[in-house]
Image (spheres, helix red, strand yellow):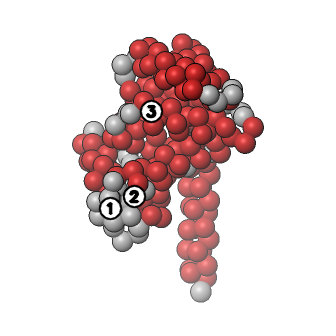
Amino acid sequence: ATMIRYITEFVFVLLVIVVCNSIALAQTNVQLLVAEADPAIQEQINRVYSHFIGPADQETKSDVLEELQRLKDITKEQDQIVKQLAIFVATTVSEEDMHLFAAETMLHFLEVPPRITIRVLAPYLDAENDQLRSFVRGWFNQHDSLEHVHGKPPLGSVNYHEYMEYVRSRLNRNEEIPVGFIRYIYDKHPGKA
């Protein structure tokens, strides 16, 4: 009985250490992400955002599209744009989280391929920053929705095809799979995860 108690205590302490390390790592990841802010791209994202929070009319829609095109023109690296949108979300405060809606809409109109968005955002599925985590989970949930894939996603309720490509590419480079990503897939469909 004493041995079982020691084993139980050891496992509990080990779990506490793992959880604390995961929290510290998630906070560090967000800090490292924010440190990569590109002032020119952030300024342009804020220009686009200013049109979202202003009065909506036909001219505003046209302005948004023009500003989005300018955002595309700043860099051709789509992964950089996704990363900068994540930084914008993590560092902006708005009434009723309007900036989350704006960032999701920007990402949609920029037509970034899902494989790029998955690669950039997957490490932040369990971010300590509530806004960033909500933005990332919102994108992944939308990606897995039936409307997004025009029919039933491959392999059921989750679009595992693109997720499998992401996992393969990480494993081929001897990189770990983000814990939040594994948890997300498992929560969606444990049997297929």
Give amino acid for label 3.
Phe
Judging from the image, what secondary structure is the residue with disc 3 in?
helix
The answer to whether residue 27 of the structure is visible from this angle is no
Q: Quadrant of the C terminus?
A: bottom left
Front residue of this view, candidates 90 and 112: 112
Q: Is residue 103 visible?
A: yes
Residue 124's disc number: none
Labelled pair 1, 2 in contact (Cβ < 8 Å): yes
**Front in this rendered view, residue 32 or 116:** 116
Disc 1: which residue: 152
Label 1 to label 3: alpha-carbon separation:
23 Å
Residue depicted at 58% across the width and 74% down the height:
8
Q: Which residue appears farthest toward the right when viewing the image?
A: 95
Residues at discs 3 and 2 in contact (Cβ within 8 Å): no
User: x and y percent of residue 3 in the render?
Assistant: 56, 80
**Which of disc 3 and disc 1 is earlier in sequence?**
3
Q: Residues within 10 Å of mark 3 (few under 14, many from 20)?
A: few
Residue 109 is labelled as: 3
